[in-house]
Image: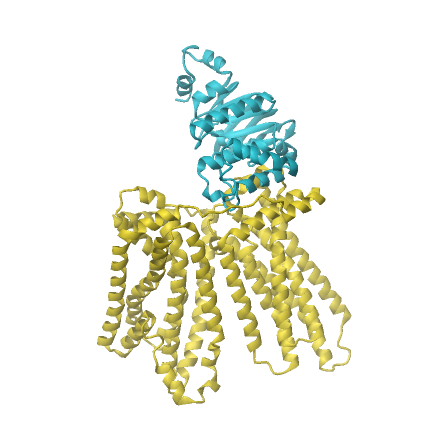
């Protein structure tokens, strides 16, 4: 569903992403790991179409994100690391705005928005302006916006930052359901425990290059210490 | 501790200067040069005016001091209004406050730091604008350099006192009504006050002061000139200190300068003391969001989208922007100022001393340029910033299946309507007030309608060419490099429009004056072609450049 071919991104002389190639199939949850400044956010921005690659290409559902951005974006959902939203819209209006932008029928919106607000415990705040929302509430609203339109490929950049434990648990279940229903998930995260338990495969990026890729078990087998070690130990060793 | 807080500002300023390289440095130097040219022009204007006043027999020196007291009174009022608006942000909403409040800093010291910041931001532009006046005053009156030092000595407590009004007002209001809604109301009150001062000042017909016929009742006039302008306000104390200095009356100079200094110290000591009790209360209240409950209903644009599904993306962005505009107090304040601007504009047109019908019609033609300038100035506040004001939320549109050209078209659609209405109102009423003839009325109305469209396209295009999604308010965009380019382009366009139309208008007047065969149809055709080329260029070039830039813009 998401195919990355020899992706490179430079900022002046600095190579933020260096010749990255990945393939994430439908139903797969891919965890993208790496230390700060490794190139995770740059990669996910390129995948979402808000940044252009220097070379290489990205295909989403067969559509090139640079050549056919509208077709690719219609089936793609992206949640950035910082949940910036319009402060003078209400939660309900924001979801409706997302629904309208992605052409969700009005009838479906009317039925699903209250349900989603309820799932994320935002019903009481649905009529409030977003300037009154906390970081976690905004994050939950963005996730609700993604669910409203049932995309085929999802990009998350640190999705659980600011969420309370209950919401994290709920988010994990939602992610598993989304993948079960055939969507591909690409998730940047620092929470190695979550990646270990949730992701069907992971990739580790370091200084712009992919240094390890495979299922958690495969990566553990690859590492010198063998399968008995945790993903955290292997990650720290590889990125030292 | 206060020293550390000041040092962080000095370091920020120093680092900002050090970071200026290449294109950024060139841009800033160009900006600085333009600013200096404007200050020089102001100086030239003030010198001519003061020379004229000083040259008036007997009362010349009185006239120039009277004008000085009026200039200082206006500066005083403007600093007060600015400080009311600015203090709300600096004292309660600046981005560094949460960090500073979490640090082990004495609350009163923190308040003092923010109070001085308020005074600086609310007065520096006004002081800069007054500076050429003071230089011109010193030159015209042939005063020694000590005069300027005496001015600086008096003006520092003067601005501190003016700024204290806004600071004290905001602090008390936030203490009594601790909510973010208070900020919106204060901004509105601030804009209303500016508008009121502006309209009231214009309605007093200040031009009468300079007209010779106002000198008829000499004794009464001299009496007026000698009377103090608001004797209990610091603006009068500064004037008196300067007059005393010039007359070598040291006792009076030190008593007025001392009064200013003592008053400033007393007010800031009081605020310093009060802040320990009430500043925290207000800051805490400022964090709470106002209660708002939007009702889920189908909006007009959504109903339209049901009919025109192909325009759903455009209509969606339209309703989003419409709601945002309606709920943001910053736009209401701007709208109030625009209404004041229009009222003063029409009043000034009415006051023009025009005797003949031909002269009135001719002024109606020239009015195209002035009305166009007003539209461009309004565009600088609404149209040019439209793209940049998406701010950090621009990622939502960038990641959505919406093309950049649709985003720009939607912004144009939203800003074109008010621009057209304002342009049409200005030109229709001006033509009516001036009793312009039919030819000029039709020509000016059509020209302004077309100019409204062109200037709006130019605003969106250049706004996309110079986007800045990190800005926090419209003022930063207005005074940006892009804002300057937009105004320069709009002015250039309007000058060329008036220049091209001058030929047919000349023919029209030749006909009115009874000249035989006044119309040169080849000339008219040439002007029409030039006008069409100009409009096409003014629309296509900024739009295409802006579109190309925004498409490749990365967040």
**Residue A45 makes an appearance in the image:** no
Residue B407 drawn at (x, y percent): 61, 45
Residue drawn 38% across the image and 83% down it: B224
Residue B50 drawn at (x, y percent): 41, 77
Residue drawn 42% across the image and 50% down it: B180
Compared across the picture, whether B472 is left or right of B356 comes to: left
Residue B69 appears in which quarter of the rendering?
A: bottom left
Give the colouring mode of the picture.
by chain
Residue lying at the far left of the rendered structure: B251
Counting every numbered tag in the picture gives 0
Compared across the picture, whether B189 is left or right of B368 comes to: left
Pick the residue in front: B521 or B112.
B112
Query: In the rendered image, what is the letter of the chain coloured yellow?
Result: B
Pick the residue in front: B547 or A193.
A193
Pick the residue in front: B229 or B294.
B294
Compared across the picture, whether B52 is left or right of B513 comes to: left
Q: Is residue B165 above or below residue B201?
A: above
Residue B397 appears in which quarter of the rendering?
A: top right
Residue A206 drawn at (x, y percent): 45, 25
Residue drawn 68% across the image and 71% down it: B441
Q: Is residue A98 above or below residue B255?
A: above
Q: Is residue B167 above or below residue A164?
A: below
Colour assigned to chain A in the rendering is cyan
Residue A98 drawn at (x, y percent): 58, 38
**Residue B369 makes an appearance in the image:** yes
Q: Is residue B228 above or below residue A93?
A: below
């Amino acid at each position: 569903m998401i195919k990355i071919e020899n992706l490179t991104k430079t900022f002046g002389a600095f190579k933020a992403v260096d010749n990255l190639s990945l393939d994430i199939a439908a139903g797969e949850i891919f965890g993208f790991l790496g230390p700060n400044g490794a190139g995770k956010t740059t990669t996910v921005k390129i995948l979402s179409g808000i940044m252009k690659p220097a070379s290489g290409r990205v295909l989403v559902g067969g559509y090139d994100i640079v050549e056919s951005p509208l077709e690719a974006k219609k089936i793609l959902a992206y949640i950035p690391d910082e949940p910036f939203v319009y402060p003078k819209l209400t939660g309900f209006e924001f979801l409706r705005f997302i629904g309208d932008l992605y052409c969700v029928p009005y009838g479906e919106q009317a039925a699903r928005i209250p349900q989603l607000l309820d799932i994320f415990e935002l019903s009481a705040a649905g009529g409030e302006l977003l300037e009154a929302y906390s970081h976690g509430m905004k994050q939950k609203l963005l996730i609700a916006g993604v669910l409203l339109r049932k995309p085929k490929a999802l990009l998350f950049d640190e999705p659980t930052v600011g969420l309370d434990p209950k919401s994290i648990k709920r988010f994990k279940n939602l992610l598993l359901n989304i993948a079960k229903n055939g969507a591909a998930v690409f998730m940047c995260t620092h929470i190695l425990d979550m990646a270990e338990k949730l992701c069907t495969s992971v990739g580790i990026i370091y200084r712009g290059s992919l240094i390890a890729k495979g299922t958690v078990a495969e990566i553990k087998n690859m590492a010198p210490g063998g399968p008995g070690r945790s993903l955290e130990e292997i990650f720290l060793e590889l990125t030292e | 501790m206060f020293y550390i807080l000041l040092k962080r500002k000095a370091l920020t300023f120093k680092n900002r200067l050090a970071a200026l390289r290449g294109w950024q440095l060139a841009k800033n130097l160009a900006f600085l040069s333009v600013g200096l040219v404007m200050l020089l022009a102001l100086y030239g204007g003030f010198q001519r005016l003061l020379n004229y006043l000083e040259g008036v027999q007997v009362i010349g020196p009185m006239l120039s001091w009277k004008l000085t007291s009026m200039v200082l009174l206006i500066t005083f009022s403007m600093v007060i209004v600015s400080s009311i608006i600015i203090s709300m942000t600096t004292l309660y909403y600046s981005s560094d406050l949460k960090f500073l409040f979490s640090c082990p800093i004495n609350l009163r010291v923190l308040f003092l730091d923010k109070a001085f910041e308020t005074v600086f931001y609310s007065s520096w532009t006004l002081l800069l604008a007054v500076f050429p006046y003071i230089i011109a005053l010193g030159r015209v009156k042939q005063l020694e350099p000590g005069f300027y030092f005496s001015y600086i000595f008096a003006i520092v407590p003067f601005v501190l006192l003016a700024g204290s009004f806004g600071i004290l007002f905001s602090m008390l209001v936030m203490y009594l009504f601790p909510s973010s809604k208070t900020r919106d109301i204060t901004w509105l009150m601030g804009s209303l006050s500016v508008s009121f001062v502006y309209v009231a000042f214009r309605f007093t017909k200040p031009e009468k002061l300079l007209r010779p016929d106002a000198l008829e009742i000499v004794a009464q006039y001299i009496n007026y000139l000698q009377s103090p302008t608001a004797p209990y306000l610091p603006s009068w104390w500064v004037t008196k200190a300067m007059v005393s200095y010039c007359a070598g009356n040291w006792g009076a100079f030190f008593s007025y300068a001392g009064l200013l200094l003592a008053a400033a110290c007393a007010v800031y000591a009081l605020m310093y003391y009060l802040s320990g009790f009430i500043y925290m209360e207000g800051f805490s209240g400022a964090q709470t969001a106002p209660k708002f409950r939007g009702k889920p209903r189908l909006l007009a644009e959504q109903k339209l989208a049901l009919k025109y599904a192909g325009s759903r993306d455009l209509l969606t962005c339209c309703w989003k922007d419409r709601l945002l505009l309606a709920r943001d107090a910053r736009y209401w304040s701007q709208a109030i100022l625009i209404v004041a601007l229009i009222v003063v504009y029409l009043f000034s047109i009415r006051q023009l001393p025009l005797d003949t019908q031909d002269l009135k019609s001719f002024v109606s033609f020239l009015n195209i340029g002035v009305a166009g300038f007003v539209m461009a100035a309004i565009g600088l506040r609404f149209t040019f910033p439209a793209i940049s004001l998406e701010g950090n939320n621009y990622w939502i549109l960038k990641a959505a299946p919406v093309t950049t050209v649709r985003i720009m078209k939607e912004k144009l659609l939203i800003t074109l309507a008010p621009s057209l209405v304002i342009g049409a109102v200005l030109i229709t009423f001006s033509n009516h007030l001036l009793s312009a003839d039919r030819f000029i009325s039709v020509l000016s109305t059509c020209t302004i309608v077309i100019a409204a469209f062109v200037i709006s396209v130019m605003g969106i295009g250049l706004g996309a060419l110079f986007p800045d999604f990190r800005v926090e308010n419209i003022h930063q965009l207005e005074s940006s490099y892009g804002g300057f380019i937009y105004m320069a382009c709009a002015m250039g366009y309007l000058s060329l429009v008036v220049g091209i139309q001058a030929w047919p208008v000349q023919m029209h007047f030749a006909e009115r004056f009874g000249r035989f065969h006044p119309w040169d149809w080849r000339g008219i055709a040439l002007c029409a072609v030039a006008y069409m080329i100009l409009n096409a260029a003014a629309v296509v070039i900024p739009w295409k450049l802006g579109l190309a830039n925004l498409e490749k813009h990365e967040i």
